[in-house]
Amino acid sequence: MRKVFVIVFLFLLVEAVFVEALNPSLNDDVLGLIVFKSDIQDPYKKLKSWNEEDDTPCNWDGINCNPRSNRVTEVVLDGFGLSGRISRGLLRLQFLHRLSLAKNNLTGSISVSLAQLAYLKFLDLSENNLSGNIPGDYFQQCGPLRSISLANNKISGQIPESLSSCVTLASLNLSSNQFSGMVPSGIWSLNGLRSLDLSNNLLNGEIPVDIQGLSNLRALSLGRNKFMGEIPDEIGGCLLLRSIDLSENSLSGELPSTMQKLSLCSEFILRRNAFVGIVPEWIGEMKSLQILDLSENNFSGHIPTSIGELESLKVLKVSRNRISGSLPESLSSCVKLLELDVSHNSLAGTIPKTVGQLKSLNILDLSENLLYGIVPVEIGGATSLMELSLDKNSLTGEIPSSVGYCSSLVSLSLSHNSLTGPVPEALAKLTYLQSVDLSFNKLTGVLPKQLGDLGHLSFFNISHNQLQGELPSSGFFNTISPYSVSANPSLCGAAVNRSCSTVMPKPIVLNPNSTDSSPNTVPQSIRHEKKILSISALIAIGAAAVIFVGVIAITVLNIRVRSAAPRSAAAALTFSGGDDFSHSPSTDANSGKLVMFSGDPDFSTGAHALLNKDCELGRGGFGAVYRTVLGDGHPVAIKKLTVSSLVKSQEDFEREVRKLGKVHHHNLVTLEGYYWTPSLQLLIYEFVAGGNLYKHLHEGSGGCFLSWNDRFNIIIGTAKSLAHLHQKNVIHYNLKSSNVLIDSSGEPKVADYGLARLLPMLDRYVLSSKIQSALGYMAPEFACKTVKITEKCDVYGFGVLVLEVVTGKRPVEYMEDDVVVLCDMVRGALEEGRVEDCIDARMQGKFPADEVIPVMKLGLICTSQVPSNRPDMGEVVNILELIRYPSEGQDELV
Ligand SMILES: *[C@@H]1O[C@H](CO)[C@@H](O)[C@H](O)[C@H]1NC(C)=O
Ligand SMILES: *[C@@H]1O[C@H](CO)[C@@H](O)[C@H](O)[C@H]1NC(C)=O
Ligand SMILES: *[C@@H]1O[C@H](CO)[C@@H](O)[C@H](O)[C@H]1NC(C)=O
Ligand SMILES: *[C@@H]1O[C@H](CO)[C@@H](O)[C@H](O)[C@H]1NC(C)=O
Ligand SMILES: *[C@@H]1O[C@H](CO)[C@@H](O)[C@H](O)[C@H]1NC(C)=O
Ligand SMILES: *[C@@H]1O[C@H](CO)[C@@H](O)[C@H](O)[C@H]1NC(C)=O
Ligand SMILES: *[C@@H]1O[C@H](CO)[C@@H](O)[C@H](O)[C@H]1NC(C)=O
């Protein structure tokens, strides 16, 4: 350092005497550079080679000399990490052609008048930290300067008027400073100027008609200033223009038609101004266009068909205008297109199938328009697509699986449309996918599990759809935001805070080859779920309300019927035996018809029971049941139908009842006969002593609770009865514990089967309100108009019954401020590994766990939300027998 000071001291005080005496010209360069060095900080020691003791600087880093004269012609110190000020020392470098100090951290103002250097052609001080004003006369003595760049500094004030003295100037780059005011008019007459970049300053005023003076101009960049007014027609005179960027100003008016002469122009950027009028048809004349950005203006009209003539076009952006009409098919001729953004306009019509021909397309943004119709299958042809945005349109139909061929896709947005159908599994093939927005559509089905394998996923929004089942549980889906999955009432998984059942579609896997006997675990892979807790709760609550109304109506009916019934019942009885039914078609309300399938003749003695409240056994959705004794002394139960106004015609009624009368099974309460008048119908059943299962489970008096063995017998007997009914094509429709009677030997006998057949139609309202009235037993498909009701509704009811028998709890329990749905409770407990807590405590632990737990799982499987996922009753019986007698095989219940 001391040496530097000495040199500088010498330079300043005795240069004329001492230095020039030795070797004047040579040491001018050394000393000039040493002085320059002394004014700056060089933290990276880039100027280490600059040694003041050298005779010549020609070997110093960043310095070039003319080999013949050995004078410094170039100082290029770009990116040396230098800070400090630009020193006057540089003025000593009289033969300097090029001074480039770009990409450093030089500060202070440009006060040293570098333009004085007689040979300086290239001056680049860009990307520093220079500030202050440039004096107006700074370039007064402008030599042969061809290129000036002061870009990316903090220089303020006006652009110096004296720049117009630099008549040889070809390139002027003042971008990204704080220049303000108008552009000095002299600039527009720099005829040699090829590139003018004044972008990103605070310049104002209009683009003058003088612009035609810049007849050599290739690149004009005035973007991000405050220019106003219209583009002058004269711009068409700058025939060599290749790039025009006027973005982010306040320019207005229409595009001057003279611009069509600019056939060399490849970049035309007018983004974010206030241009109006149509996108002119002549745009097709600007044949070299590669980038056309008219976005964020006020253009109207259509996208001209002539756009197809722009065969070099790579980027077309017209977003955020008022463009209408449809996307021209001719776009498919722009085969080099990389980016097409027409979002936020009023485009209507369908998405042209020809989109698929744009093999190079990276970005397609058609969002926020009025497009309708489907997402064309041909989209799969756009194999380079990285970003596809079709959101906020009115698209319908399914998401085509062909999107799986867009193997470069990173971002997919289809939100706010009316898309239906499933999320295609093919999405899982798109390994680069990062962002998927499918929110606000009408998508259904289960999300493909494989989506969890997408390693780059960081956003996946499916909110506001009708998706169902379990969310993928791996990868990104572990941490998915609840806001990305909300408003899909049937989705389950941690993110939606709704637990999935532990069951799978075909949950019982009997693998005779397996030696592993761990029946208590349900493998993760088969956890599969399509359920809705809230819907079953809703149905339960809805049904409760309907039942209440129903009970009142039935009571009123009863009062009316009771007064007329006994007389007619006793008055005209016709008898029939066996299957040989006698028909006495009577339309008289006072005459009735009695049919006993077994041929028992003496019914009349029992008629009194209908009036005798003491003989009433109970009431159900269909009516009251009374006990009476026939003439031969054998007791029967008589059910008086209280839905008579809904009952079918006599003919239909008799046909259905006879059919039920033919169903015989050890575990079914036998239908022994019936009585019919237009206003009163009775069904005569076998009498079963011992009460019903409901009473045994929930009202039983202390001490006589059912053992596990009793319970298992009841479950398997009930299963067999249902299997038999289904074999005979009879759906029970109304399985519940109060319809399972227990005879004196503890055998279950199922009652009330098939009564829905007596109604004129299987009206869902009637079914759900009158028949499947018992809370909690009702299969979810009763709530869904589009799902056919099959015998699987009985399997559901059976599943609930199984859980009820094992846990001793009602299907729906009302707590103080909560409704507990039994199967959800058990399912939750199983998931949490504490299913044993659910087992009826009254059994006092006296049960084999290897029976109880598989039975509970079976119950859960039977209560699968999707009917086809439930086993049929035949399978259920087989499984129960396997659980009871596993010795018969090496079979395993998984
Ligand atoms: C640039 O220089 C200024 C002043 O000399 C200093 O404060 C700042 O840290 C420097 N920045 C860098 C990136 O070197
Ligand atoms: C510019 O200089 C200022 C202070 O002079 C400093 O704070 C800032 O970091 C510098 N900027 C750069 C990019 O070096
Ligand atoms: C002006 O300089 C900036 C910064 O170095 C650069 O990014 C820009 O491309 C230049 N403009 C032109 C027209 O060359
Ligand atoms: C666009 O043009 C219409 C009429 O031509 C005018 O009403 C509207 O204000 C303009 N909008 C903007 C943002 O300039
Ligand atoms: C998902 O989309 C919905 C609707 O567009 C939005 O409300 C929600 O914030 C989005 N989720 C996330 C995580 O951004
Ligand atoms: C999830 O549900 C439980 C119980 O309903 C509640 O306590 C919890 O706060 C919920 N969590 C979230 C994230 O909503
Ligand atoms: C059981 O083993 C037999 C013969 O080893 C094989 O053919 C059969 O597919 C196996 N069954 C299952 C369910 O694995």
Image (cartoon, rainbow, N blue to C red):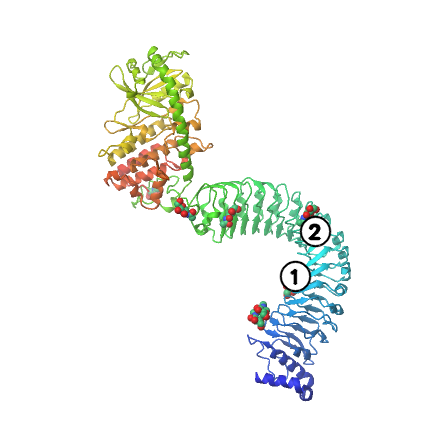
Q: In which quarter of the image is residue 105?
A: bottom right
- Mark 1 and ligand 3: say if the CB distance to the nearest ligand atom is below 8 Å: no
Question: Between 521 and 822, which is closer to the camera in this rendering?
Answer: 822
Determine crowd level at label 2: few under 14, some 14-19, many 20+ residues with C-alpha closer than 10 A. Answer: many
> On the picture, is 269 further left or further right than 756?
right
Residue drawn at the location 43% of the way across and 37% of the way down: 535
- Mark 2 and ligand 4: say if the CB distance to the nearest ligand atom is below 8 Å: no
Which percent across, then down, holds residue 306? 70, 47
Quarter occupied by the N terminus = bottom right
Question: Between 518 and 701, which is closer to the camera in this rendering?
Answer: 701
State the residue position of label 2: 275
Which percent across, then down, holds residue 31? 64, 82
**Can I make out residue 70 in this image?**
yes
Identify whether 314 is placed above or below 469.
below
SS at mark 2 in the image: strand
> On the picture, is 740 further left or further right than 759?
left
User: Sequence order check: which comes first, mark 1 or mark 2?
Assistant: 1
Identify whether 116 is placed above or below 878.
below
Which percent across, then down, holds residue 586? 40, 11
Identify whether 523 is placed above or below 678.
below
Q: How many labels does the image show?
A: 2
SS at mark 1 in the image: loop
Question: Between 86 and 126, which is closer to the camera in this rendering?
Answer: 86
Amino acid marked by disc 1: Asn
- State the mark number for residue 200: 1
Amino acid marked by disc 2: Phe
Which percent across, then down, holds residue 92? 68, 80
Callout 1 touching callout 2 (CB < 8 Å): no
**Can I make out residue 304 in this image?**
no
